[in-house]
Image (cartoon, rainbow, N blue to C red):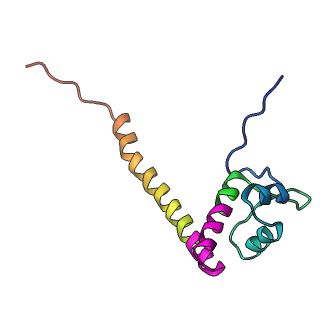
Amino acid sequence: MSSRPAPHSDEGVYGITVAAGLVGMEVQSLRLYESRGLLKPDRTSGGTRRYSADDLTRLRRIADLIAEGVNLTGIRMLLELQDENRRLRGQLDQQSRRPLDRQASRPTAARRPR
């Protein structure tokens, strides 16, 4: 019996009906959020939407913001800022690791006996 590895969190695996059910939303809401640019699910070659675990997390975040009274334009702006912040933090993390990588690869000077 062969077991498939679990999909990556950004791999679209859920159809729109399943995704809507998993996050407690109506299918039309998912379509609306996509049309407003709040998320961009994967598409099959036939055009069927496929939602990932990351998309489900984003949909839950959208639901939380709506419950707090934020409108869709505000949600789009907040999500864009959060995405940009995540991207910049990733760059900073990558840059902060580089000096450590260089230091580790640098040969150490042999100590002279006294």
Spot the residue most to the left: 114
Q: Is residue 38 magenta?
A: no
Quarter-wise, where is residue 65 in the image?
bottom right
Q: x, y percentage for residue 107?
A: 32, 31
Comparing 95 with 58, the one in front is 58
> Measured from the top left, where is residue 43 in percent x and y?
82, 59
- Residue at 33% across, 39% down: 103
The foreground one among 35 and 92 is: 35
**Type of secondary structure dominating the magenta stretch:** helix
Asked if residue 61 is among those painted magenta in the image, a careful observer would answer yes
Whether residue 108 is situated above or below residue 44 in the rendered picture: above
The residue positioned 72% from the left and 38% from the top of the image is 6
Relative to 109, does residue 73 appear above or below in the rendering? below
Location of the C terminus (image quadrant):
top left
Q: Residue at x 43, y 56 (%)?
A: 92
Q: Quadrant of the N terminus?
A: top right
Compared across the picture, whether 91 is left or right of 48 comes to left
98 in relation to 66, above or below = above
Q: Which residues are magenta?
A: 59-79
Residue farthest right in this picture: 46
Residue 81: percent from left, percent from top: 53, 71
Image-quadrant location for residue 47: bottom right
Count of all numbered marks drawn on residues in the image: 0
Residue at 76%, 52% in the rendered image? 12
Give whichever of 59, 24 is nearer the camera: 24
Q: Position of residue 91 (x, y in %)?
A: 47, 57
